[in-house]
Image (cartoon, helix red, strand yellow):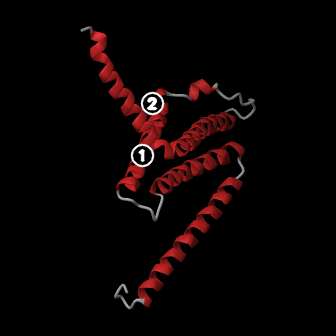
Amino acid sequence: MTNSAILIPSHSFITKAFIFLIAYFTPIAEMVHVMMFFILLDTISGIWASVKIECDKDKETYKDSKCKPPSWFSKVESHKLRKTVYKFVWYTIAVMTSLMMEKTFHLAWTSLSSIVGGFICFVELKSIFENITVITNDPIFMRILKVIQKKGSETIQEIGDDDKNIGENTNGTGK
């Protein structure tokens, strides 16, 4: 018997396991791609905002000089990019584990992975808006963010009021 005959079953197992994982996590593939896009936009806008801040500091220091922003590469540091990779990995793990909870505990009443992924994307969007505000010196995106936060707070308050009304209608008996 040759070594290649021995390797075929293990190769087959690895292939089957890989196919199983892809099939199992297919429902969140699009969400992971969107999260990756938001993280990429946040990284690009963060670098751009950092360059803009440096440029503004140079203008203050050298009043009569024209600001020539440093190259993009001078603002890119490996430890900061490593944080971006960690962020993507851990965000993906969070969405994957929430999908596993949905499937394991049959949480048909909610899409936990969508809630987790949506929250992550909202946090990234907030960061992108903050960076755009720095880049453009226009607070319109922060105003938009405040409107979104206000609507979210109102919705949460309504949910809390509904829960309170349910408790009052049942006289605390739960029936």
Q: Quadrant of residue 90?
A: top left
* Residue 45, image x, y percentages: 62, 39
Precedes in sequence: disc 1 or disc 2? 2
Q: Closest to the observer: 101 or 155?
A: 101
Q: Residues within 10 Å of mark 1 (few under 14, many from 20)?
A: many
Q: What kind of residue is marked 1?
A: Met
Q: Closest to the observer: 168 or 2?
A: 2
Q: What kind of residue is marked 2?
A: His
* Residue 43, image x, y percentages: 57, 37
- Are the residues at dot 1 and dot 2 in contact (C-beta closer than 8 Å)? no
Q: In the structure shown, which secondary structural element does the residue marked by tag 1 occupy?
A: helix
Circle number at residue 96: 1
Q: In the structure shown, which secondary structural element does the residue marked by tag 2 occupy?
A: helix
* Residue 156, image x, y percentages: 52, 71
Q: Residue furthest left?
A: 1
Q: Residue at x 43, y 43 (%)?
A: 24
> Is residue 92 depicted above or below 112 in this figure?
above
Q: Residues within 10 Å of mark 2 (few under 14, many from 20)?
A: few
Count of marks, rendered view: 2
Task: Give the Cα distance between marks 1 and 2.
Answer: 26 Å
Q: Residue at x 66, y 37 (%)?
A: 52
Circle number at residue 79: 2
Q: Nearer the viewer, mark 1 or mark 2?
A: 1
Q: Residue at x 41, y 61 (%)?
A: 107
Q: Residue furthest top?
A: 2
Q: Residue at x 72, y 35 (%)?
A: 63
Circle number at residue 116: none
125 vs 68, left or right, is: left
Quarter of the figure with the C terminus: bottom left
* Residue 135, image x, y percentages: 68, 42
Quarter of the figure with the N terminus: top left
63 vs 93, left or right, is: right
